[in-house]
Amino acid sequence: MREYHYQYWLSAIKGIGCKKIRSLLERFDTAGEIYRADRKYLEKIPELRAKDIESIIRSRNETKIKYGWENLIKKNISFTCLLREDYPEKLRNIADPPFCLFYKGSLPEGQVPSVAVVGARNASYTGIEIAKKMGRELAENGINVVSGLARGIDIAAQKGVLRVGGGRTYGILGCGIDRCYPQEHIESYMKMQEKGGVISEFYPGMPPYAGNFPMRNRIISGLSDGILVIEAGEKSGSLITAELGIDQGRDVFVVPGNIYDPGYCGSNRLIKSGAALVTTTRDILDGLGIFVDEDVSVKKKKNEVMLETSEKIVYSYLGLEPIHISEIVCLSGVPMQRTMECLLSMELKGVVKQMGNQYYAIVL
């Protein structure tokens, strides 16, 4: 077998979680060495119980391991782990990083700023609209958005990102990567694989057990530079993500709410505890140290004054990240010929620039 087979095997041993894997890796340099270790050596590791050692030895089946790996490939599921260079550096540096990640699409690029957006599942109309707006504006400013694909604030922010050409959003799952939970978000789940990715530490096929979601939250915060909380109640799961983020040294941003609204009790308490109060996306950019004379959303509103109706439609899908004309057509629904005419006209007006090979971005 190859080393990636051994890494995959190590991630899938029943009863051997992240802590026990870390204990093993303190004594072995590779997963292959663990696979080949004899029983007597394993018995000297105090963190391993007798049943753990039995699980390790019983799982050493090359045929099953290779079959499982081939199944991942067939399902277009990618795999990485702490032993690999492509493992996200931000996540590697948290206190309790997952040993492995299964993903579809791509992993976040370490040099690109990322913001986690979290909040109530039973969010108000206002909360949903704020999440959509801030998700879209973060994407327009070249910020990745990380969230949990959950109902309410999570999916609203991620849908906002998906409206931006070149926008990138990452859905962190509390179940196996081959499951979409909740099922009604399947369209966004599929789109994220093209404009970001969906990621899980759980083995494919794992149901969405309740205990998985607090574990999932440390990945949401761990992949991010800051956490934006929108509409969190007194016992909201979003508070767990925010607290994890604080422990990981992340900035926490909170949209304030009515002091008499129980849906904002958790949000307002975070602000009292020292989280940054934000009312605009510009506040988040400043908090992350991304200082700009004018953020993209403000600049776009000014530029729209000089645009015709169809130009405004095309322009609304552009951001700082270059996007190919074919994707603009797909997102906007404007026919190819008319899209080309709009882009040429906007280039002449100085609000859009071609980045080469029919990729376009806005001019700041």
Image (spheres, grey):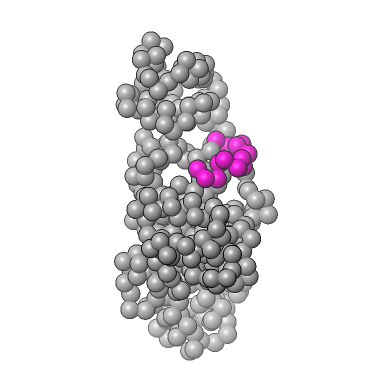
The structure residue drawn at horizontal position 44% and vertical position 33%, both measured from the top left corner, is: 18
The structure residue drawn at horizontal position 55% and vertical position 65%, both measured from the top left corner, is: 264
The structure residue drawn at horizontal position 47% and vertical position 40%, both measured from the top left corner, is: 101
Tell me the quarter of the picture where residue 176 sits: top right
Residue 143 appears in the figure:
no
User: Magenta residues?
Assistant: 203-215
Q: Quadrant of the N terminus?
A: top left
**Where residue 91 sits: x, y (%)?**
39, 46
Q: Is residue 211 magenta?
A: yes
Q: Please identify the residue farthest to the bottom as the structure is shown.
A: 306
Q: Is residue 55 magenta?
A: no
Q: Please identify the residue farthest to the right as the structure is shown.
A: 184
The structure residue drawn at horizontal position 34% and vertical position 56%, both measured from the top left corner, is: 111
**Does 136 appear above or below 114?**
below
**Where residue 350 sits: x, y (%)?**
40, 83
Q: Nearer the viewer, residue 197 or 258?
A: 258
In the image, 146: left or right of 247?
right
Q: Nearer the viewer, residue 145 or 153?
A: 153
